[in-house]
Image (spheres, rainbow, N blue to C red):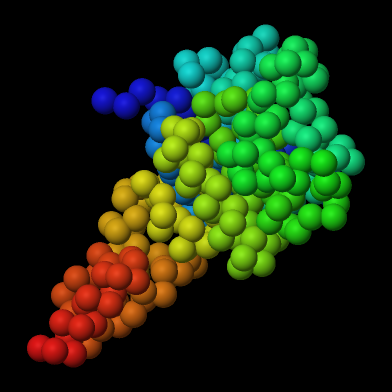
Amino acid sequence: MQEKIISAENVDFHYSNEFEENENAPVKQVLKGVSLDIKKGEFTAILGHNGSGKSTIAKHMNAILLPCGGKVYVDGIDTSDEERLFDIRQSVGMVFQNPDNQIVATIVEEDVAFALENLGVPPYEMRERVDDALKSVGMYEYREHSPHQLSGGQKQRIAIAGIIAMRPDCIVLDEPTAMLDPHGRRSVLKTIRKLNREFGITIVLITHYMDEAAQADRIVVMDNGEIVMDNVPKEVFSNVELMKKIGLDVPQVTELMYLLTQCGLLSDTHIIDEEECTEALIKILTA
């Protein structure tokens, strides 16, 4: 059995009403009794429309937010233990939607080294970590460039390198491709897959792109602060009607297969990649 790196137990969360015009307005529960385990080495995607709670649960995974009820544990450490905050954030790194919010230096390698300097990592080890991190995201040749002259996808890979240099066991990415063009999205997702498959880093990807989620080992679907589905991609996306009911799409391939089943031409809706789709279409056309 795989060991858990993150465990959320019956987590409730709401934001304070102190800045609302009407302080007596009912508090909106953002998370409602969410329980979720993330296993070491796993690539998990979390889906949900805006306001579903997916980004909020992500921010609980390295103690940016703390539960109003329930508990979150990282490597067995209670995230509410302020004295262990450093250990928690060493285990779980966070990458956000806008890379410009994480880039602080004027030279790429200095930016990747920034957190290490604050941690007091010795210079010889820092050099090794920075070089290894940049190579792992395919950005080593840009180490002496200015981050602000790079494309959005390249900036996001630099932000990811900064987290990798800290050598976390898990990286949580909160919609890291939302501001990127298709080329940038493919580049960042390729990097994420490489980190998971070649380096064994646990990945939690918050996304609203179905094709990205389809590449994960597991998909968690959230709606209205609760988990409504948790399964492998083929099983999640085969629930086309439920996905649409909660305001989410499915991969285009799955949509096509679903329409063919509605017409009685196909019986299998568990198809989420193009190769399987092509094989299914050939069978229909040659039958």
13 to the left or right of 35:
right
Image quarter of residue 115: top right
The residue depicted at 75 percent of the width and 46 percent of the height is 142
**Is 242 rendered above or below residue 262?**
above
**Spot occupied by residue 134 in the image (x, y as percentages of width and height):** 66, 38
**Is 127 rendered above or below residue 259?**
above
Nearer-the-camera pick, 45 or 165? 165
Q: Is residue 195 visible?
A: yes
Q: Is residue 54 visible?
A: no
**Is 121 rendered above or below residue 141?**
above
**Spot occupied by residue 100 in the image (x, y as percentages of width and height):** 80, 48
The residue depicted at 75 percent of the width and 12 percent of the height is 122
Look at the image and tell me in which quarter the N terminus lies. Answer: top left
**Spot occupied by residue 201 in the image (x, y as percentages of width and height):** 48, 33
**Is 247 rendered above or below residue 5?**
below
> Which residue of the protein is positioned furthest toward the front in this rendering?
141
The residue depicted at 17 percent of the width and 86 percent of the height is 284
Image quarter of residue 78: top right
Marks counted in the figure total 0
Nearer-the-camera pick, 60 or 201? 201
**Spot occupied by residue 174 in the image (x, y as percentages of width and height):** 62, 46
94 to the left or right of 74:
right
Look at the image and tell me in which quarter the C terminus lies. Answer: bottom left
Nearer-the-camera pick, 42 or 35? 42
> Which residue of the protein is positioned furthest toward the right in this rendering?
106
Nearer-the-camera pick, 11 or 144? 144
The residue depicted at 73 percent of the width and 37 percent of the height is 16
> Which residue of the protein is positioned furthest toward the top in this rendering?
83
